[in-house]
Amino acid sequence: MARFNGYIVCCSLAVLAFACVATPRQAQDMEEARAAIRQVEMMPLAREVAAEELHEARAALSYAELSAGKHDSAGEISNAILLAKRHAEIAAQQIALEQAKRTVESAEREWQARAHESGDGADDAATWQDASSRSKLPGVGTHEHSHNRS
């Protein structure tokens, strides 16, 4: 009987030691996910361009927090945290892409205005429009904002 109790105590200590190791890592990962979401929320265009991804990131983080509170499996909590981080990363990339598109469109308008003012860039403007419409980025140099590549 003493051996059996010793075994239970030993196993309990092993489980407790594992829980102490896993919890700080999960807490750190959750904080990283929170920070990533906050960083994206502060970016210009976040609400306009990445609202859906931010919503998904917040939902995944909330699920991770609830799962941790209910002491769900470490794998389930880690997966939810990873999902929250990935949604935040996707949101940041959506914002960066939209900013790049707007920068190119602004430069194109400025370039065309200068070409029009000088009167000698009409052919160059047509060349710019043709070249930019063949760009690898969808919607860059054109007024299309589709995500499908031609």
Image (cartoon, grey):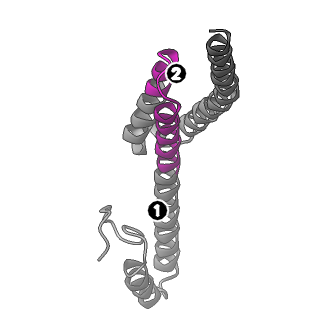
Residue at mark 1: 101
Question: Which residue is pictured at 53% across the width and 68% down the height?
Answer: 107
Percent x, y of residue 133: 37, 78
Q: Is residue 79 magenta?
A: yes
Q: As shown in the figure, which amino acid type bears the numbered disc 1?
A: Lys
Percent x, y for residue 135?
Answer: 42, 78
Q: Amino acid at mark 2?
A: Ala
For label 1, the SS is: helix
- Mark with earlier residue (1, 2): 2
- Reply yes or no: does residue 34 show up in magenta: no
Indicate left or right for 31 with 113 as reference: right
Q: Nearer the viewer, residue 119 or 142?
A: 142
Distance from Cα at disc 1 to Cα at disc 2: 40 Å
Residue 91 or residue 112, whichever sits in front: 91
Residue 149 percent across, percent down from the top left: 32, 73
Q: Position of residue 39 (x, y in %)?
A: 61, 37
Quarter of the image containing the C terminus? bottom left
Q: Residue at x 46, y 43 (%)?
A: 87
Name the disc covering residue 68, or none: 2
